[in-house]
Amino acid sequence: MTTAMLAKTDSVAPSEAPAPSPAGAGRRRTHPLASTRVQSILLLAALLGSWEAAVRLFKVPKHLVPPVSDILVALWRGLATGPLAKDGFWYHGGVTVAEILLGFVIGSGIGLAIGIVVSQMPKVEALLEPYVAALQSVPKVAVAPIIVVWLGFGIGSKVMIICLLTFFPVLVTSIAGFKAVDPDRIDLLRSLSATPWQIFRKAKFPSALPYIFAGLNMAAAFSVVGAVVGEFVGAQAGLGVLILQMEAQADTGGSFAVCVVLSVIGIVLTGLLRSIQRRVLHWMPADASQRTVNV
């Protein structure tokens, strides 16, 4: 009987044993074109190719819409100059980047500081709310000439304009973030005899960080716009001045090339902020953090 059972077991076991899976069968191979970054590059190439073909096919005048090839030539010509050449992109780009960084840091820093004070003192928020709403509704382009008259054609007027554009997004989003903290966390800290500073540091500020970074991302884009607007109104150097000079010479391809440089500056600044955000908000799931920032 034992021999029969062993024989039956031996006859069944091979059929019930799982078949060995081929090496690498569990790995999911992704096609190179499935990458979002590759798709974005391909889309850009398709758009630029369509632009070039449409301009050539319909014989659009170059002073209206230049072909992509002319923009690339102007971009190479501007980048091939020396860093101190007054007609090159490096000199004017350095001036614009300095204005952007100074205005962004000062404006967003003041906005965050006032947001912190308001979060700790609700009466201050009620006092400042009508003034903030009034100043935020004033078009910054309208006051830019006045600021240039006050501060001159130097870097100070451009930094002031950028500060006005970057101050309000950070202020509004930081106040919203400090209000969005879970009340249960505050009650828990109070039950543990936490001081107001400890409540702010342990509960309010971490909860407001996604909102603050959302405001910083908006402020980064506004800072580039503010720098160009200030240089349009009155400046001695900068990419905005270079655009005006090229438009006066009917060099539309050069103007588009400068716009490409401005776009790259904005992309780099936003990328740095995203990198800092990933390091600071390492405790937050990536999808949740991205949803909050993109609101």
Image (tube, rainbow, N blue to C red):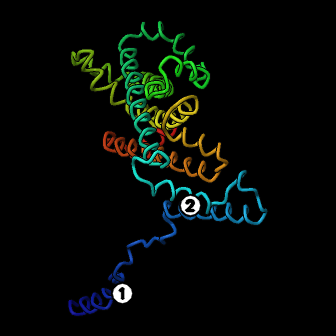
Q: Camera-side residue: 59 or 185?
A: 59
> 10 Å neighbourhood of mark 2: few (<14), some, or many (≥20)?
some
Where residue 236 appears, as percent x and y from the top left, is 49, 33
Q: Camera-side residue: 44 or 83?
A: 83
Describe residue 197's horizontal placement relative to residue 166 as left or right: left
- Residue topped by disc 2: 73
* Callout 2 secondary element: helix
Give the amino acid type for the residue marked by disc 2 in the picture. Val
Describe residue 26's horizontal placement relative to residue 34 as left or right: left
Is 290 drawn above or below residue 63 in the view shown? above
Is 142 drawn above or below residue 22 in the view shown? above
Q: CA distance from mark 1 to mark 2?
A: 70 Å
**Which quarter of the figure is the N terminus placed in?**
bottom left
Where residue 175 appears, as percent x and y from the top left, is 44, 21
Give the amino acid type for the residue marked by disc 1 in the picture. Ser
Residue 151 visible in the current orientation: yes
Q: Residue at x 41, y 42 (%)?
A: 94
Pointer 1 or 2: first along the chain? 1
- Residue topped by disc 1: 15
Q: Residue at x 42, y 71 (%)?
A: 28
Where residue 136 appears, as percent x and y from the top left, is 55, 19
Residue 169 visible in the current orientation: no
Is 201 drawn above or below residue 210 in the view shown? above
Q: Residue at x 51, y 41 (%)?
A: 239
